[in-house]
Image (cartoon, rainbow, N blue to C red):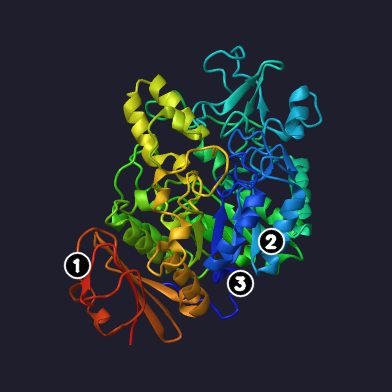
Amino acid sequence: MTAEQPDDAPWWTRAVVYQVYPRSFMDSDGDGVGDLGGVLRRLDHLTDLGVDVLWLSPVYRSPQADNGYDISDYTDVDPAFGTLAQLDELIAALHERGMKLVMDLVVNHTSDEHPWFAESRSAPDSPKRDWYWWRPPRAGMAPGQPGAEPTNWHSFFSGSTWELDEASGEYYLHLFDRKQPDLNWENPQVRHAVYEMMRWWLDRGVDGFRMDVINLISKDVGPGGELHDGPPIPGLPYGDATSSVVCGPRIHEFLQEMHREVYAGHRDRLLLVGEMPGVTVEEARLFTDPAREEVDMVFQFEHVQLDYDGSKFSPRPLRLTDLKASFGRWQAGLADVGWNSLYWDNHDQPRAVSRFGDDSPRHRRDSATCLATLLHLHRGTPYVYQGEELGMANAPFEHLDDFRDVESLNHYAQAVAHGEEPGAVLGALRRMSRDNARTPVQWDASPDAGFTTGTPWIAVNPDHAEWNAEAQREDPRSVLAHHRRLVALRHEDPVVALGDFTMLLPEHESVYAFTRSRGGVTLLVVCNVSGHEYRLAELLPEAGGADLVLGNLDVDDPAVLRPWEARVLRLP
C-alpha cells in the first residue's frame, strides 16, 4: 500500500501531459515535415482531449542527425519547424487555453555543429577545449589505431563512444551519435552557460523542461581526469560504460545547482522532468524528494525493458507478473517521497498497442483502451504520446530504406557486420525501431492522413484509412473518447490523482488489478490484459457489489471479464 497525498499537492499531480513530436505531428507548409504552424493548427485536438501540458520535442536549430536531439543553437528555432515568433505564438495560445508548454532540453550533449564545439575543436589550446571531453589515444598507441580509443565504452547508438579528430590526433566523447559530443559538466563555465540559456526560455514564458538523459551529465572522473574502461560486453569489442556515466558522483550536486540558478522564483508554475536511463527506485526517491530541490519526477525505463531478451533488438513477450512487480515497486518506492511518471509510448518506444496489446482487428480498440486504463489509474502523472489516443500501431516497414532512425540504421549496420542474418535484423527493427513511433499522426482518411499536402518525410501507416482522428472524434466507443474520459476522471476525482495504491493478484498472469483509496473512497481497477475470458467473481469477490465508474466495454455480465476488458469500480 502507498500513502495518500495532501490536498495541497502540486498542480502536476492532477495533470495529464501530451507529447508532440513536431516532425510527425502536422505539416502546415507542404514540405512533408511537421512544424510549429501545424501544432498551432491542431490545438483544438488537445483542448478536446482535455490535457494540461504540451511537451514539445526539440525544435531548436539542428543538423537533424538525431531528429533535433543534436542541438546547434539553443535559443533559436530550426527553419524546418518554423520561427521563434511562431513558438511565442504557441506559448501564448496554450496559456490562453489554460495549458502549459514544457520544452524538451538536451544538455548532456550538443551537435558537433554547435559554435561551442566548433571552437572547442579549433585547437588543443582553445578556451573552450575543456567544454567537451577530449582525450589522447591510449598510451603507446597511434591515433586511429584499433583499440587506441581512450576507453572501451560502447555507444548507446552502436560502435565506440570516441571519435578521432584527425587535425589534433585526439578523441572526443559521444555517448550517442558521433555528431552528438558530450558536454563536460565538470567545467563550471559549461554549467552556467546552460543555466543562462534555461533562464532565457523561462523568461520567454516556457513552463518547464523535460531534460533528456539528464542523469548522464556527471561522469566518474579520476583525480587526474582519467576515465576508466567498462566490463566487456559479450560478443562485442566494447565495454559497458554504465558505471562511469549513469548517475555519476556529482549528479545531485549539478541538479541542485541548476535548481538554485534557474528555478528560483518560478517554482510554483513549472514542471521539471528528468529522463534518466538506468535510474533505480532508490535513486529516484532522491531525485524527486521536494526537500532536495532537484526534479519533480523522472522518466525511468525499467518497465519498457522487461521485454528485452538481453537487448532492445532482441525482444521477447512481456510477462504481466514482471510488469506488476516493476510498477508495484515504483508505486511503493515513491509513495511517501517523490512522484512517478506514467507512460507506455514516446518518441523512443514502439507503439504500445502493438508491443504490449493486440493490434489485430478483433482486439486493437479494446487492448488500446485497456492499456490506457491500466496506466492512467496508477498514482503518478500520465503522459500521452501523439497518436496513442487514437490507438496508432506499429508501421509495416518492409525494407531497410523505409527506416529513418539513426539508432536503427546504426544497429543494422553493426549487426550485419558482426554476422547476423539481415532478415532477422530487419525483423527486430520492425518490432522495436523508434520509427514505429514517428510515423505521421493520422488525422483523417485522405492519402497522407491529413498530415501534409506534400511527401511525408517518413511513410504514413496505411491503416490510417480506418484509424484516424476524424473517424473517432464523434464515436463514443473510440479510443479517443476513452482517453477523454480517463483525463476527465483524473481531473474530477481526487482519489485518482492523490489516493494510495494497493496491488492485487500479483501472481496472476493475465489480470492486472489494484485499488486506489482516499478519504474513505476506494476504486477497484481490473484490467484483463489477455485474449481470454475470466470469471471476475472468482478472482475478486468484492467486485460484485461495486458501481461501475468507467469501463472500456459495455458490461453485459458483471461476473465475466472479457478479453482486454478494463473496469474502474467504486467499492461500497
Give the percent coordinates (x, y) of residue 254: 67, 50
Which comes before the other along the chain, label 2 or label 1? 2
Describe residue 402's horizontal placement relative to residue 174 as left or right: left
Nearer the observer, 2 or 231: 2
Name the residue type under label 2. Answer: Asp
- Of 362 and 281, nearer the camera is 362
Q: Is residue 58 visible?
A: yes
Taking the image as shown, residue 134 lies to the left or right of residue 564, namely right
Local SS, label 3: helix
Q: What's under tag 1, amino acid-wise? A: Tyr
Residue matched to label 2: 207
Q: Are marks 2 and 1 in contact (CB under 8 Å)?
A: no
Q: Is residue 150 above or below residue 14?
A: above
- Hey, what amino acid is under mark 3? Trp
- Residue 534 is marked as 1
Q: Which label sits on residue 120? A: none
Circle nearer the N terminus (3, 2): 3
Discs 1/3, front: 1
The image position of residue 217, as x and y in percent, is 63, 43
The residue pinned by badge 3 equals: 11
